[in-house]
Amino acid sequence: MHGCAPQIPALDLTPEIDLLWNDIQSAIADVMRSGQFVLGPQVHAFEDEMARALAVKHAVACNSGTDALVIGLRALGIGHGDEVITTPFTFFATAEAISLVGAEPVFVDIEPRTLNIDPQKIADAITPRTKAILPVHLFGHAADMDAILDIARRHGLVVLEDVAQAFGGRCRGRSLGSLGQAGAFSFYPTKNLGAFGDAGLLTTNDDHVARTARKLRTHGTERRDRNEMIGYNSRLDEIQAAVLRVKLPYVETWNRERRRAAATYRRLLADVPGVSPPIVEEYAIHAFNQYTVRVTACDRDALQQSLADAGVGTMVYYSTPVHQLPVYSDHHAELPVAEKAAREVLSLPIGPMLSNHAIGRVVDALRQACATVAPRQVVAA
Ligand SMILES: *Cc1c(COP(=O)(O)O)cnc(C)c1O
């Protein structure tokens, strides 16, 4: 029972919209007055600003993070008959993009600390058909890029980073999305830089990859009536680019506030046994798109329900690892670390404007819920 205490939703996008209301309104009005709505000056300015922010040579805006992955894979030359090594513990789109270009996802288990792909297990999965590694910087925490890039170099593979959840995150000081041959970003509204709809972006330092990606997003051509390949309609529109340009200068500060929120959680969770805060490796600066704890003391689903009854919204990313989804039922891999994580993870409310007071209430609710929910039945392995 939550009495008269206000609810804490899993995610609240309204404070940042309120903060920037006037600027966003006038940016959208300017686009409407300009009469240019698709792939115009706002998109080009946004691409330049993103390339500068990430210290990459090229940034190619497109319609979604999923499209950025698909276009990135194709621009890197991945297609039918190729295998791409990736993580099973991610949003479906990561693997879906691999399948969409005609290649086959090969799932490698994760390591238990960061829940990212385990570099130690990649080498065993390499076959003569392997062309690429697609690591995901899950929840905003860098995959171990030094180890991954080292394996890729030794085996002649390319690396496409899925940076959808990690804009502003770093690995050993370098921006995520600038380390592999290409990086795919999403600006879906829930990401750290969110549009007012769908939007995405591909980053690369490779001129050929950038040029191919630009063609692919506009029906396989740079010029009208010169179509060279089968591409997509994945043009970004001017209103989304204008909104993203208003928000972009704030993201670094907002990410710092996300880390402040995470530090508050960590301190308060220290006396909640059976709920483990996320681990941040020394090589990573976390972007905390999600604040995901592991619940070991009791049944995660029962705990989530109990928190909902107390007015605290949470999410489970992800309750089913990708290799166990119906669409990949012909994949018979057993990936016990990912399967265990799927039973234990719980994402708590986080955002740059979430107050320490609200975090205190979330943790109080967690402590109470843990005390009332029955201990978890022991699951083998
Ligand atoms: C959000 C997300 C995507 C897809 O991005 P969209 O813009 O929704 O298409 C891909 N991978 C991961 C890890 C994501 O979180």
Image: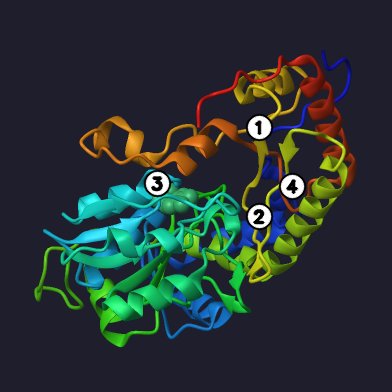
Q: CB of mark 3 within 8 Å of CB of mark 1? A: no
Work out whether mark 4 precedes mark 2 in sequence or the reverse, and give the earlier one.
Answer: 4
x and y percent of residue 323 in the render? Answer: 33, 40
**Label number found at residue 124:** none
Q: Residue furthest front?
A: 380
Q: Which circle, 4 or 2, is nearer the viewer? A: 2
Residue located 39% across and 46% down the image: 88
Residue located 41% across and 76% down the image: 149
Dot 4 amino acid type? Pro
Disc 3 from disc 1: Cα separation: 22 Å
Q: Is residue 129 left or right of residue 62?
A: left
Circle 3 packing at 10 Å, graded few (<14), some (14-19), many (20+), is: many
Dot 2 amino acid type? Phe
Residue located 52% across and 67% down the image: 144
x and y percent of residue 169 in the render? Answer: 61, 67
Disc 2 from disc 3: Cα separation: 20 Å
Disc 2 from disc 1: Cα separation: 15 Å
Circle 4 packing at 10 Å, graded few (<14), some (14-19), many (20+), is: few
Residue 37 versus residue 345 in the image, above or below: below
Residue 325: quadrant of the picture: top left
Residue position marked by numbered label 1 in the rendering: 314
Disc 4 from disc 2: Cα separation: 17 Å
Pick the residue in front: 362 or 36: 362
Residue position marked by numbered label 3 in the rendering: 88
Residue position marked by numbered label 2 in the rendering: 288
Is the CB of mark 3 within 8 Å of ligand 1?
A: no
Residue 360 versus residue 226 in the image, above or below: above
Q: Which circle, 3 or 1, is nearer the viewer? A: 3
Circle 2 packing at 10 Å, graded few (<14), some (14-19), many (20+), is: many
